[in-house]
Structures are given as structure tokens and as C-alpha cells.
Image: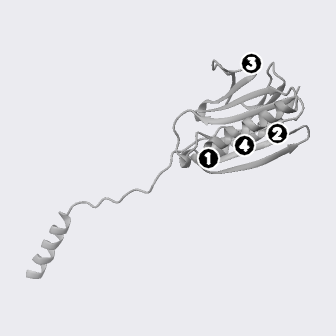
Amino acid sequence: MNKVIFIIGILIFAACSEEVTVPKPRGFQRIDFPAKKYYRSQNPCNYSMDVPEYATVELDRYPSAEPCWYNIQYKPFNATLHLSYKSIANRDTLFKLLNDSRTMVYKHTMKADEIFENYISKPGKSGIFYELDGSTATNAQFFITDSIHHFLRGSLYFNAATDQDSIAPVLAFLKKDMLRLIETLEWK
């Protein structure tokens, strides 16, 4: 009988102990990406391109913006692709634009872990697509030119402070749109 009382006492004592909480596994925000559907964006400047349906093209309203500067707003992702178009007057203008583009990218070397240069060579256009890894203000930039008349520069910015890990899926998604823009870009 003592053994039975002893076992019941242990069970009661064990039942009264605090509940042990187990940490939940780390979770990630779910991002539902829209279908990739594009439309042809026309503007009064000297180029046209494909833009995704979930984005809007707006004239750049910044006070120092030039007439052919546009912003592609990716509102579902709180991101903006800034586009700057310039006409090329001569070789000196082209070299200045190329140098300015490279300078704008490499200003981020203090925060960038790595900068990848992906060269673009298509009939009638060439350029570089830059991918910046690390805690930089911009994670992707490019320039594209025909080397004679036209020069287009683009840089993608998220409109809020970001963490590299949290934006990685969105960045990969938007990078495809940027590459499609470059692929379908036509000079007028």
C-alpha cells in the first residue's frame, strides 16, 4: 500500500510542475507574387520597353529631374526603378555617361559585400547589369546604350529600410523584370 501511495504522490507532484514551452521554429513572411504579365510602355522620349502590369510608369517629379527621367513604381513591393535617359551628342558625352554610371554604382562599395558586373551585348545595345550584395541602398543598377545616340540608366531602390535577407525573394523577382526591360528595350 505504501508503494501505491508513493507512486500516486510522485504522479501528483509531477502533474503540478510548470508547463515547459518549446520555442517555435523561425518563420518567414509569405510573399504572394503576381503573375508575370507585361505591357508595352511608350513615352515621348526615344525608347520603349516592356513593363509588368503590377507596376506603373511615372514621370520623375524630383525638382532636378530632366524631361526623360521616369520612375517605375512597384507598389506591391514598395520599390522604385529610377530610369534616366540621355541623348548622346558625341564620344565625350558617352564616356562621361559611362563614367558617371560606374561612379554611381561604386559609391556603394563601403556597404556592399560584393558587386557583380554582368555584361550585356545584344544587337543595337550593350551595357552592364550590376548586382550589389550587402546592406546597400540599391541592390541592382544597369546602363544600356547603342553607343551612338541613346543612353539609359536604371537603379532599383526599396522605399524603406531593408534587410538583405528579407528582400532577397522580392529582389530576385524584380531582377527578372529589369532584365525583361533591357531585353525588350527599343530605341526610336
Please tell me in which quadrant of the rendered image residue 152 appears. top right
Please tell me in which quadrant of the rendered image residue 148 appears. top right
Q: Residues within 10 Å of mark 2 (few under 14, many from 20)?
A: some
Q: CA distance from mark 4 to mark 3?
A: 27 Å
Labels 2, 3: front one: 3
Q: CA distance from mark 1 to mark 4?
A: 24 Å
Residue drawn at point x = 88 percent, y = 35 percent: 147
Residue drawn at point x = 15 percent, y = 76 percent: 7
Residue flagged by tag 3: what amino acid is it? Pro
State left or right for residue 188 relative to residue 9: right
What SS does tag 2 mark? helix
Labels 1, 4: front one: 1
Tell me the quarter of the image containing the N terminus: bottom left
| Residue nearer the viewer, 175 or 31 | 175
Q: Residues within 10 Å of mark 1 (few under 14, many from 20)?
A: some
> x, y percentage for residue 34?
65, 37
Please tell me which of labels 4 and 2 falls first in the chain: 4
* Residue sitting at the far front: 92
Residue at image mark 2: 183
Please tell me which of labels 2 and 3 falls first in the chain: 3
Q: CA distance from mark 2 to mark 3?
A: 24 Å
Residue drawn at point x = 75 percent, y = 38 percent: 99
Tell me the quarter of the image containing the C terminus: top right
Q: Is residue 1 visible?
A: no
Residue at image mark 1: 109
Q: CA distance from mark 4 to mark 2?
A: 10 Å
> x, y percentage for residue 129?
75, 44
Q: CA distance from mark 3 to mark 1?
A: 30 Å
What SS does tag 4 mark? helix
Residue at image mark 3: 67
Marking on residue 176: 4
